[in-house]
Image: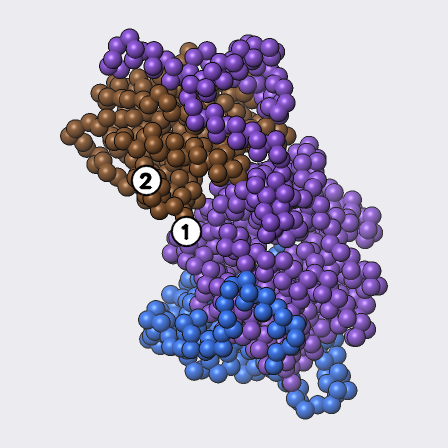
Amino acid sequence: MHRLPIMEFFPKAMDKKPKVTLFIQCLVDAVWPQVAEAMVRVLQKLGLSLECPTDQTCCGQPAYNSGYRREACIAAKRFIEIFEGSEIIVSPSGSCVHMVRHHYPELFCDNPAWRQRAQRIAARIYEFTEFLVDVLGVEDVGAHFNGRITYHDSCQLLRGIGVKDQPRRLLRHVAGAEFVEMKNSDYCCGFGGSFAVKYPDISAAMVNDKVDHIIHSGARAVIGCDTGCLLNIAGAVSRRSLSIQTLHIAQLLAKDYL
Amino acid sequence: MPDISPETYVKVAKKGIANPVLQKALAGLQDRFGRGTAEAYRRLPEGPELRFKAHDIREKAIAHLDALLEILAAKIRANGGVVYFAQTAKEAVNYCITVARQNNVHRVVKGKSMVTEEIGLNPALQAAGIEPVETDLGEYIIQLAGEKPSHIIAPAVHKNRHDIADLFVKKTGIRRTTDPSELTQAARKALREKFLSADMGTSGVNIACAETGHITTVSNEGNIRMATTLPRIHIAFMGMERIVARLDEYEILLRLLCRGAAAQTMATYVSYISGPRRPGESDGPDEFHLVILDNGRSRILADPQFKEILYCIRCAACLNVCPVYGKIGGHAYGFAYSGPVGAVVTPLLTGINRAKDLCLGETLCGACMDACPVAIDLPRLLLALREKLAYGDENWQVKPASRMEGLAYKAWSYLIGHRYIYERFLKMAGVGQKLFPRSGTMIRRLPPPLAGWTQSRNFQPLAKETFIEGWRNKKAISNTP
Amino acid sequence: MSTPDQEYFLRRIRRALNSKPDFSHHGSPLFAHAPSPEELQILDNHRRRTAADRNALLSQLMEAALPIHLCVIPVPDLIAAATAIATLAEAKKPEWSAVKNIIVWRHPLIDLMELKAPLNRLKIPLHRTEPMDPAADPTQDRIEREHLRSAVTASYIGVTSADLCMADTATLVLRNRPGQPRSVALVPSIHIAVITLDQIISDMKELFALLRWDDRFRSEGLSNYMAFISGPSKTADIEATMVHGAHGPREVYLYVVSGK
């Protein structure tokens, strides 16, 4: 994991609001589109104009994490071609941002031309909460929720792109919500892409620990910033017939929940 | 020969998950050491950033490994020690047995050393009619039980006090007690006899320093000092990579080692050994042998992608934070080295194909890299191993692990290259998923190859319409979002 | 003085590294040939240490000693140290036998303590280690070694000094010398060390700076065996429960003669 400094082209207080290009994680697109819709509502409420390339598909992370570098390269080139003209790219998924920001430049380590293009994109992509807090300087979007909430740190979000505090700040500003930390919030939930399918026993043991910690926190809802983890947690919560809500932070901030 | 069984990863992992004693022990271990180590790094005067400096120190040492080993060997010989360079596990073991036979050794007291586990020293000594006695309390316990260590630093972490009490009653005939201090006292007494009667002591090497010509051993119990002080002969086994050039570099590594291994600022004992006792000294061994081991390491060294794993100083910090190790325990890894470091080292030392589950059976969460005192990028190394398994590799004699999967990713790369076809595919899948049993809105059971997911989780079905479709449709209605 | 196994081994490493044999490393940047600015500063601080600095180090040492169960006891002089040791010897029971024996290093500081008199009053035999004749024949050598072995295993207390003590981790530094065998600080159940205030240094950086560049320490180097000892032996191998006295001493006492 080569950690590039985030090149902040955009100062915190901006006179002119930039045009935001949406990069929608494939899981969100296909399985949980409500997450993207909620993100759109939050960004629109902040007065941003949005665009969304409709030929986007996947950043290539699944192939990359399974060792299929060549296929990941194909996905990366396509992604770069689609998003190259964008001023600022925002995604509701920390792992995809990590892929683009850190792994793209590394994928093209022996291809200077593509590497440069990858680096340019890497400097312009932000995860949703990172964009709100670090770029826009927004911590309160006027959301409210009744009850106790807790937060799960997704691995690539936390350790890949170093986003830890931003979602917590946003959660602390949700009116009516009592934010509590669960035990081992930074432990992997056991998703790991194809890991969850290939190593079901280990993955199940991990996600059940995660759910136990959520139960123990007494929270009504667990909030996360990466849909992979959330599908995993929601799947286990549902299998155990628990009444805990599993929400993407965008859903909470857009008040898109029951 | 050493037991090597990385093939049974999944099977043994399952057993570990189902073992409540192990689960409790692993949770306790990670709560204590995982968190403690992070805190110990934060309290370093230089901060956790010191790990990156240590990474550079290790990188430099490995880049000059030939020179450093040559200097170390020359200095130890000048001090009256004997240095043997063992290309293979067999050579290392045979050397030890030859020295033992020459000196009429019947009993060997061992300080904890994973490298002797790697080369299978204990079974080889036994086969040669020599009694090896593990003296680290944890190692002693598992030797009595006839098991393998399940953690690099805390080898008996998988046993609770009741297991140990039963074991001691059965094997040593003591009165039953479950009090850890009484159990420790019983082992102390039994092992004191062994220390005083052994003819040979063995140890590993934590870090050697070329500038001074010393190896160092680190322990809290004092067993390594006993094993290297009381018997007539001391043989130290050292993985060839465990060396740094200078004392000031060593200082940084030792501080990080103690923090990484046990969240300590300093282990109780650190010994610097450069040779046997000198004339006029009335204790210490008459003979000191240093066995420097390759056993596949030079092959790793030759590969720029994998060289970084040789920076490892075997502190086990990565085990103490790994969420996978925290569930499955160390035995699943099937070799001396467990946890994230085992997942990288074992395939490289024993064969990537046979240890494929070690390469694939992690989530790449990255906790290990943050815990590593020398900041090794373990996720990157796992990815590099996965790449070998994906495409095969002549150099490492790897065959592609799954042709089907390879084809699937080829198809996938085509699919994601064409949004229109991709959407049609999702639509078809959306229709197909109606066949699967549900509980509420969630899918309860999926067919292979996705069956693993629904083994203990429900699956959120595909949405009727993708977000992008919705966006396109809305845009078609009004041109401003 | 290379061997065939070494030649082959190093050749493989060189091939892996894609490098040529390097015989010029004596002048290479791998090693330092003069102290770094940081080390010069450390050595300078060491030389300029005032009485107040030394007392501050003692306080730091005592604080670091607490969590690792090392008992640090400042005493005004050696007489007081000897009295304290005798009191301790009277109070403690031997672990392995009913008889009390004490073994002490042959060391100027320990010699000056004159432990013999107070221990005589308690009827506790005192063994003092002696350097062996380096030219002793093998039989004599074996006899003397066995003599030490039986004395050290019979003793419940071993008394040593130390070369230095690092305050920040409460670590004693002992170098091996004839007459100062390492087993005295290892085999008896209780280890007592006696040092003077000026033997306390700050940390490992200072220790290594002294060992590398200060003539008083450099000449002897690390010796063939140097030990760091930080408190009593311990283990947490059974359910992560801390137990003191795994193999080494169960208790360690450090008397610091502060001269006041």
Contact between marks 2 and 1 (CB within 8 A): the answer is: no
Where does label 1 land, which residue? B48
Residue C193 appears at what percent x and percent y?
Answer: 55, 71
Residue A197 higher or lower than B59, as above or below: above
- Crowd class of label 2 (few under 14; some 14 to 19; many from 20; radius 10 Å): some
- Inspect this view and state whether residue A235 appears: yes
Q: Which mark is residue B175?
A: none
Compare residues B441 and C113 and report the one nearer the observer: B441
Q: Quadrant of the C terminus of chain B?
A: top left
Q: Is residue B179 left or right of residue B405?
A: right
Compare residues B453 and B327 and report the one nearer the observer: B453
Give amino acid for label 2.
Answer: Arg
SS at circle 1: loop
SS at circle 2: helix
Residue A96 higher or lower than C59, as above or below: above
Compare residues B161 and B155 and report the one nearer the observer: B155
Q: Which chain is blue?
A: C
At 40% across and 77% down in the image, what residue appears? C33
- Inspect this view and state whether residue C100 appears: no
The chain under label 2 reads A
Residue C69 appears at what percent x and percent y?
Answer: 55, 58
At 66% across and 89% down in the image, what residue appears? C133
Q: Which mark is residue A117?
A: 2
Residue C65 higher or lower than B164, as above or below: below
Give amino acid for label 1.
Answer: Pro
Q: Quadrant of the N terminus of chain B?
A: bottom right
Q: Which chain is purple?
A: B
Q: Is residue B195 left or right of residue C35?
A: right
Q: Which chain is brown?
A: A
* Measured Cα–Cα span from mark 2 to mark 1: 33 Å
Residue A238 appears at what percent x and percent y?
Answer: 55, 17
